[in-house]
């Protein structure tokens, strides 16, 4: 499935940028029209004069041999440009995923098992948090925690592992906030639902220790919807990371993708998009695999007939 | 639910009352937002589009309850007028993706075989495209603006809607009343339109409600990137983006007010959508 | 707020210390006194090229001028000084450049005339696609007449050429290094070889350009004090302001910063205003619409609230204009220019009179379409002012609003301009000469002359100026062109922005005039004493 997705994706993206009005050379001009000689030289160098299929075939042929092409704006290999930024996005998404899994699932389980004030608190906070767009969270976090309180840096990546963690904390929180709330709510609902099931009541009445009940009966069965929603939200982080990267001036792939699409730097858009599509599919696949491991019946049920 | 009955026969607002106080409050908020979306420009006390640089960032005074924004325009008027594009965008996304999703889901579930395989494979490919990626591309091709962003998001949400509804449609198809109707000679279209769709109706509505919230948040993010509704058109997401540096200047009101509008509506649709989902699931047993 | 000292205490080689005659703003800040380990400097977006012939924006100029030097140099006050070479004019069509003794590249190799010939040929060759080949089109030949002397022969006299050679096209790079790098020269895949006090250490797109002191700099009176300068692209205003307020960013040449007031009041940075070389103007895209009538253009200019723009868009960091060009660009013939400028009328606001002009022209009720973007504070603010002005004089206003990244299409694409009457821009020439800007839109065939504007007296004044040797006579001709331009208004001047320098309170010494785009701006940068 993945190769088919990638092929279709690459074709659609290439077609989209080809149809787009404007020229990739506009980003080079700095406000004065480029001399016609410069335009000619650049168009030749990047094959901008040739037909759509010729340009697409040229790109595809190179890509299949591992060459992702050259950025028009920077005149550097796309693979190098992506490699220098990939760890920013990966690190951000991983950090945010950690927060979502630990806090989201943790809070969901805690409040699902214990109706009461914790539960109400979690419900209220997550209802609000789920509604806050990532960029709004980013702006508020920057103003409060970076500028006013000075606890965290306002922008940039930092150098060195510990500095990176400090720099990535506010962005990771901004990215995770809404998703954390959704995961917590779904976890809570699943846990609550499982806890009220007949076989759980039976186990409790038979005197089986609470911990065993929780682990073997409640969590085991709730694990599937929890894994599903976690998988979906983590996959969605890959795209929303772009917004957070822009807000915090992080040099990640998301921010670069937006910039490259704006300037019609075709090879860069292709390279990053295909990478994001791959990551998206892989994360979703992982979630499916985990679900299938937890419940082999699922692997059979979801195949299209 | 027994054969032949449709939820259409349980009209009235009982379904709303069943969602509890949170659900009712949410419905009220959504109704108010919709009302503002329709009549907003008429309700606005001042011209939402007239800039006056000498009044930039001025605070609440007189009839200007929320003060002025970075270009000296009345914030309250802009919020009221902005409700239109802010609500219309997500509505368009929901209508497009739910309609297309329902169509594809029912076709796949009904015909099975080749059609199902083709549609499911197509949807699987579509699953690989995050909404924001599609919106960025759409903006590059069609120019930044609400139509491009809305269509992009609809396409991105389509596989999720279709997957949920396909499962439900498959279940419906297996119900005894369907076999009974087929034996009586009813056409596939008639069965689908008159029985299947209404029966999975609550699920569709619940799905649509939740999607509205996602669409609102995603569209706001797309406007933040500069690819959605174009300024100077009034729009809550754009207002946050335009006025955000006001937070650093000590003038948080314009950005915060717009943010509260978005957050409130999204909370409302999330709460209502969750309740409707529970109802739909409970009804299906 | 104006810098307190005018740099009179410094005897450095790179500053003249003169305050601008007209604006009274200081072009330099007091020289730095202490070493500093690292400075992060922001530009409005990432640097995309370090090759001077492919450099065409604020970030690229800032990076090139930090590390590379040109044949001649623009002093902070705009006058032309010797750079890597001195120049003489044995005849109106001959320029002889004599290299300074002891100038070396970062790798220790001496700068020779072969390098100069290579660099100039490269800049002038249209086949290479360099952006400045058109400005060097009067060069007939460049020959090395000795290891330290280069003779440039022209097809016609061209007294604007020295200004160009004090800018990007005049930057000298090492021939052997550039030939080895080939297409990679000046790209992230390759490197550069220049002569400046700061040399390139690394360039990682997205992270920034990192420069460190050049231990073998040819000028012994310049000692670079900063251990490492990082140029980082920060396009988002909120992010930039937060960075400056928290100290994550220590310096920035704030081009149209809407948060200037906040920065002035902060405890972490100081704001310096210096003479500007750029002009905030309304560029007329089409003379076929309502702006085709000069009375309507005059009326629009007359109705514009320029002080409002200065107050709210520039937070006070701009001047009222009398001409299209900024008086900061009077790099030569200063007394001639100053006198002519002072006797030109100030552009005042008179709405009643402006309405009458429009009525007399019979254009009341007609529509004017402005190109604009709301994502750039300056463009958005100026558009708002023009909106108000146009409505006040009885015109209907339509806006063609595009995202920020597409705004540049108005300047370079006739299709994007179709149906648009005018759009606001901040523009500047390659060197401190009012003619540098005027030529671009007054002269037929000028790069931003969008609709065949051609007034014979203006054209002949400018073309005469180009071939006039005497600076004062040249100034008189250019002043005449400015006066005529103000009457005809092919562009309507809005305000003259000052150069804005935002600098950490612990630092001093950066240039505070727009010379920072073309000549070394960090040679004096260091910690406060």
Image (cartoon, coloured by chain):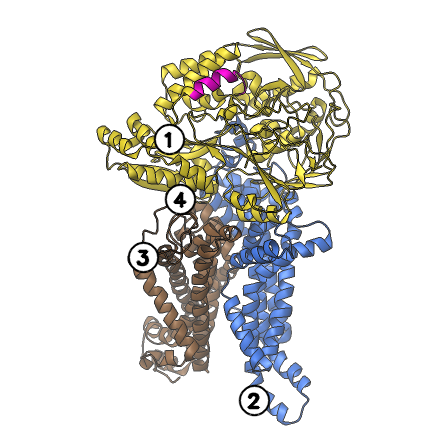
Chain colours: A blue, B brown, C yellow
**B31 versus A76 height, above or below:** below
**Picture quarter containing residue C87?**
top right
Camera-near label (2 vs 3) is 3
A211 and A58: which is toward the camera: A211
Calculate the distance from the C-alpha at mark 1 to the C-alpha at mark 3.
Answer: 35 Å
State yes or no: discs 2 and 3 in contact (Cβ < 8 Å): no
Badge 2 crowding class, 10 Å Cα cut-off, few under 14, some 14 to 19, many 20 or more, is: few
Q: Secondary structure at mark 1?
A: loop
Calculate the distance from the C-alpha at mark 4 to the C-alpha at mark 2.
Answer: 69 Å
Magenta range: C331-342
* Chain identifier of the residue bearing label 3 in the image: B
* Chain identifier of the residue bearing label 1 in the image: C
* Chain identifier of the residue bearing label 2 in the image: A
Calculate the distance from the C-alpha at mark 2 to the C-alpha at mark 3.
Answer: 56 Å
Q: Quadrant of the N terminus of chain C?
A: top right
Residue corresponding to mark 3: B44
C179 and C247: which is toward the camera: C247
Residue occupying image coordinates x 43% and y 53%: B239
Q: Are marks 3 and 4 on the same chain?
A: yes
Camera-near label (3 vs 4) is 4
Residue C93 visible in the current orientation: yes
Residue corresponding to mark 1: C285
Please name the predominant secondary structure of the magenta segment in the image.
helix
Q: Is residue A94 left or right of residue C78?
A: right
Lower sequence index among marks 3 and 4: 3
Identify the mark at residue A198; answer none if there is no mark.
Answer: 2
Residue corresponding to mark 4: B54
């Amino acid at each position: 499935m993945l190769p088919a997705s990638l092929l279709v994706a690459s074709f659609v993206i290439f077609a989209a940028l080809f149809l787009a009005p404007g020229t990739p050379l506009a980003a080079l001009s700095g406000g004065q029209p480029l001399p016609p000689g410069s335009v000619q030289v650049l168009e030749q160098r990047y094959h901008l004069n040739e037909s759509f299929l010729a340009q697409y075939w040229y790109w595809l042929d190179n890509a299949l041999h591992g060459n992702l092409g050259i950025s028009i704006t920077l005149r550097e290999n796309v693979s190098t440009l992506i490699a220098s930024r990939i760890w920013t996005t990966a690190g951000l998404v991983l950090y945010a995923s950690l927060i979502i899994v630990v806090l989201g699932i943790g809070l969901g389980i805690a409040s699902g098992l214990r109706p009461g004030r914790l539960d109400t608190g979690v419900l209220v906070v997550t209802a609000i948090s789920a509604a806050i767009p990532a960029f709004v969270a980013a702006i508020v976090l920057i103003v409060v925690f970076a500028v006013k309180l000075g606890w965290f840096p306002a922008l940039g990546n930092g150098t060195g592992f510990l500095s990176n963690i400090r720099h990535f904390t506010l962005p990771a929180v901004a990215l995770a906030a809404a998703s954390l709330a959704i995961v917590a709510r779904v976890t809570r609902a699943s846990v609550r639902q499982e806890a009220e099931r007949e076989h759980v009541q039976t186990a409790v009445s038979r005197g089986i220790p609470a911990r065993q009940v929780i682990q073997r009966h409640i969590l085991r069965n709730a694990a599937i919807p929890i894994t599903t929603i976690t998988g979906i939200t983590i996959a969605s982080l890959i795209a929303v990371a772009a917004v957070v990267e822009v807000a915090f001036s992080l040099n990640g792939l998301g921010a670069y993708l937006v910039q490259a699409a704006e300037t019609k730097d075709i090879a860069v858009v292709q390279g990053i998009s295909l990478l994001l599509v791959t990551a998206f599919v892989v994360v979703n696949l992982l979630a499916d695999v985990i679900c299938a491991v937890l419940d082999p019946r699922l692997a059979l049920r979801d195949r299209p007939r | 639910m027994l054969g032949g009955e449709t939820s259409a026969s349980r009209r009235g607002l009982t379904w709303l009352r069943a969602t509890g106080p949170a659900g009712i409050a949410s419905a009220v908020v959504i109704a108010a937002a919709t009302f503002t979306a329709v009549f907003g420009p008429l309700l606005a006390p001042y011209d939402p589009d007239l800039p006056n640089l000498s009044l930039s960032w001025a605070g609440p005074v007189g009839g200007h309850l929320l003060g002025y924004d970075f270009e000296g325009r009345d914030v309250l008027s802009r919020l009221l007028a902005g409700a239109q594009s802010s609500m219309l965008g997500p509505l368009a996304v929901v209508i497009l993706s739910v309609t297309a999703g329902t169509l594809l889901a029912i076709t796949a579930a009904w015909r099975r075989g080749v059609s199902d395989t083709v549609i499911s494979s197509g949807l699987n490919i579509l699953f690989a495209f995050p909404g924001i990626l599609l919106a960025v591309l759409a903006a590059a091709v069609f120019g930044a603006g609400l139509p491009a962003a809305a269509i992009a998001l609809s396409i991105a949400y389509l596989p999720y809607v279709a997957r949920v509804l396909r499962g439900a449609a498959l279940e419906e198809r297996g119900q005894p009343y369907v076999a009974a109707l087929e034996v009586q000679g009813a056409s596939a279209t008639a069965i689908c339109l008159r029985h299947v769709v209404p029966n999975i109706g609550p699920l569709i509505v619940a799905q649509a409600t939740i999607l509205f919230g996602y669409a609102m948040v995603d569209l706001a993010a797309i406007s933040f990137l500069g690819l959605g509704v174009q300024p100077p058109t009034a729009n809550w997401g754009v207002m946050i983006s335009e006025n955000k540096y006001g937070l650093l200047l000590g003038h948080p009101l314009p950005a915060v007010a717009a943010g509260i509008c978005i957050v409130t509506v999204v909370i409302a649709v999330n709460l209502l959508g969750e309740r409707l989902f529970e109802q739909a699931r409970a009804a299906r047993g | 707020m104006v810098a307190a000292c005018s740099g009179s205490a410094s005897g450095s080689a790179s500053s003249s210390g003169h305050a601008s005659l007209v604006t009274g703003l200081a072009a330099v800040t007091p020289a730095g006194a202490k070493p500093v380990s690292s400075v992060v400097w922001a530009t409005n977006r990432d640097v995309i090229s370090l090759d001077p012939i492919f450099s065409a924006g604020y970030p690229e100029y800032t990076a090139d001028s930090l590390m590379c030097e040109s044949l001649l140099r623009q002093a902070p006050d705009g006058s032309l000084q010797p750079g890597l070479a001195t120049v003489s004019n044995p005849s109106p069509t001959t320029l002889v450049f004599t290299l300074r003794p002891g100038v070396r590249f970062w790798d220790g190799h001496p700068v020779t005339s072969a390098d100069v010939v290579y660099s100039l040929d490269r800049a002038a060759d249209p086949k290479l696609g360099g952006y400045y080949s058109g400005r060097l089109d009067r060069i007939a030949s460049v020959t090395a007449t000795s290891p330290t002397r280069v003779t440039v022969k022209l097809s016609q006299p061209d007294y604007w050429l020295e200004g160009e050679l004090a800018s990007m096209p005049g930057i000298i790079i090492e021939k052997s290094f550039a030939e080895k790098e080939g297409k990679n020269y000046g790209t992230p895949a390759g490197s550069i070889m220049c002569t400046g006090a700061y040399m390139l250490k690394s360039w990682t797109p997205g992270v920034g350009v990192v420069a460190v002191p050049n231990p073998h700099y040819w000028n012994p009176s310049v000692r670079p004090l900063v251990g490492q300068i990082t140029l980082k692209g920060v396009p988002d205003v909120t992010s930039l302001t937060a960075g400056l307020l928290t100290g994550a960013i220590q310096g920035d040449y704030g081009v149209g910063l809407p948060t200037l007031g906040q920065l002035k009041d902060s405890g972490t940075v100081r704001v310096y205003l210096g003479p500007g070389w750029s002009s905030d103007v309304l560029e007329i895209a089409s003379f076929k619409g309502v702006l085709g009538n000069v009375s309507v253009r005059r009326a629009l200019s007359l109705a514009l609230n320029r002080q409002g723009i200065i107050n709210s868009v520039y937070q006070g960091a701009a001047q009222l204009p009398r001409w299209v060009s900024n008086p900061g660009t009077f790099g030569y013939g200063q007394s001639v220019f100053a006198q002519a400028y002072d006797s030109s009328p100030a552009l005042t606001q008179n709405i009643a009179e402006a309405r009458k002009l429009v009525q007399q022209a019979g254009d009341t009720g007609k529509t004017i379409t402005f190109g604009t973007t709301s994502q750039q504070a300056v463009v958005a603010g100026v558009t708002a002012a023009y909106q108000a002005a146009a409505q006040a004089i009885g015109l209907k206003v339509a806006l063609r609003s595009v995202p920020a990244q597409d705004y540049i299409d108005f300047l370079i694409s006739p299709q994007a301009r179709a149906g648009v009457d005018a759009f606001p821009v901040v523009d500047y020439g390659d060197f401190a000469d009012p003619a540098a800007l005027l030529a671009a839109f007054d002269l037929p065939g000028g790069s931003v002359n969008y609709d065949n504007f051609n007034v014979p007296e203006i054209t002949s004044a400018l073309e005469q100026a180009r071939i006039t040797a005497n600076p004062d006579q040249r100034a008189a001709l250019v002043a005449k062109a400015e006066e005529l331009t103000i009457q005809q208004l092919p562009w309507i001047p809005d305000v003259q922005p000052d150069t804005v320098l935002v600098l950490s309170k612990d630092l001093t010494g950066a240039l505070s005039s727009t010379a920072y785009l073309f000549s070394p701006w960090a040679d004096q940068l260091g910690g406060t004493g």
